[in-house]
Amino acid sequence: MSAPPPALEVASLAKRFAGGAGISDVSLSVQAGSITGFIGANGSGKSTTLRCILGILRPDAGAIRLFGSGVTAAQRKRVGFMPEERGLFPHERARDAIAFHGRLKGMNRYDAFVAADKLLARVGLGGRQHARIGSLSKGNAQRVQVLCALVHKPDLLLLDEPLSGLDPIAQSDMLSLLAEFRGTGGAILFSTHSMPAAENLCDRVVMLANGRTVFEGTLAGASALAPHGAIVVTADAKGLADTTKMLGGYVQPLGSSLGEAARLRVVLPPTVTHPALLQALAERAVSIFSFEPIKPDLEAAFWQLADKESTRLSKPHKAA
């Protein structure tokens, strides 16, 4: 028996705006029963991609497929969406807001309200069906927002920064809800800035930089791309750079300097150990304030890939 098609496929998607912002080459896929982390810095193109998938924006190029076929109104009804810009009115009651979104997806009035009550009870808000959104805490209002995306029992969830602004307890509750949805066979594309959340929840990750997909694959595959090196704080940035270059590596600045101290990423060849770097710095009298080996994790891999993409863009193009 052949495997079902992906819930979502995006191929070579492009959407440009005045001033040069947008996306130029985004490709990804999301399988049923999986959570795919959608990772990128602000302005990398995550929200633009989601809006193209939903039909809010019309792409300039590329292809989008839902559940193995072209995108239709019927296919989009099988999708739930939680935007980064929360769209619930403060005066709305929680139960009414959820039921309204269900009816937008084709549910009848009775079923929409029954589903809303069940979902509110599931997240511990069973006694607050009639509370107005504006009276809820930020965490509870965010729970209601994701329930609006879940009420019609979609097959695919598109979530744009669902953990933004949540405290650790609210984040944990949100992640449990998403894991439960995945357990029923649902697919999730999960845009986030939280690398630990992606590592704890996601099966696969897609990384965007400057409007392009720079990685798509497993968490292990992404982490394997993390550089070997260290994060160093020093008042002698030139000495650090010269020493690192002597060892065959290079230095990347991490933000602006704070007083005399500069925080830098040191990338070393795999054969150069951390003690070898420290010994070389001591021999050259390069003082350091802190030294933290880079962990082979998702965050380190992302910044390495983003830096490579920026380097690629900065190189002059040869004339044809």
Image (cartoon, rainbow, N blue to C red):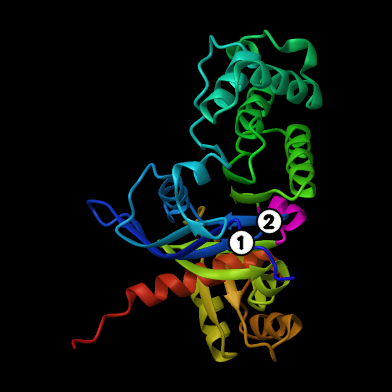
Residue at position x 56%, y 20% from top?
Answer: 100
Q: Are marks 1 and 2 in contact (CB under 8 Å)?
A: yes
Q: Is residue 191 above or below residue 235?
A: above
Q: Is residue 305 above or below residue 125?
A: below
Indicate yes or no whether the magenta region holds residue 82. no
Of residues 84 and 187, the one drawn nearer to the viewer in this rendering: 187
Indicate yes or no whether the magenta region holds residue 199. yes
Q: Which residue is mark 2?
A: 32
Answer with the quarter of the image where residue 56 lies.
Answer: top left
Magenta-highlighted residues: 195-203
Tell me if mark 2 has few (under 14), some (14-19) or many (20+) residues whose alpha carbon lies within 10 angstroms of its own: many
Looking at the image, residue 186 sits to the left or right of residue 68; the answer is: right
Tell me if mark 1 has few (under 14), some (14-19) or many (20+) residues whose alpha carbon lies within 10 angstroms of its own: some
Q: x, y percentage for residue 34?
A: 71, 56
Report how far apart the C-alphas of labels 1 and 2 lie in the structure. 6 Å
Q: x, y percentage for residue 81?
A: 55, 39
User: In what quadrant of the picture does the N terminus appear?
Assistant: bottom right
Looking at the image, residue 192 sits to the left or right of residue 171; the answer is: left
Q: What main secondary structure does the magenta stretch of the protein show?
A: helix
Residue at position x 71%, y 33% from top?
Answer: 167
Q: Which residue is mark 1?
A: 6
Looking at the image, residue 262 sits to the left or right of residue 186; the answer is: left
Identify the secondary structure beneath mark 2: loop
Residue at position x 75%, y 53% from top?
Answer: 201
Answer with the quarter of the image where residue 99 lies.
Answer: top right
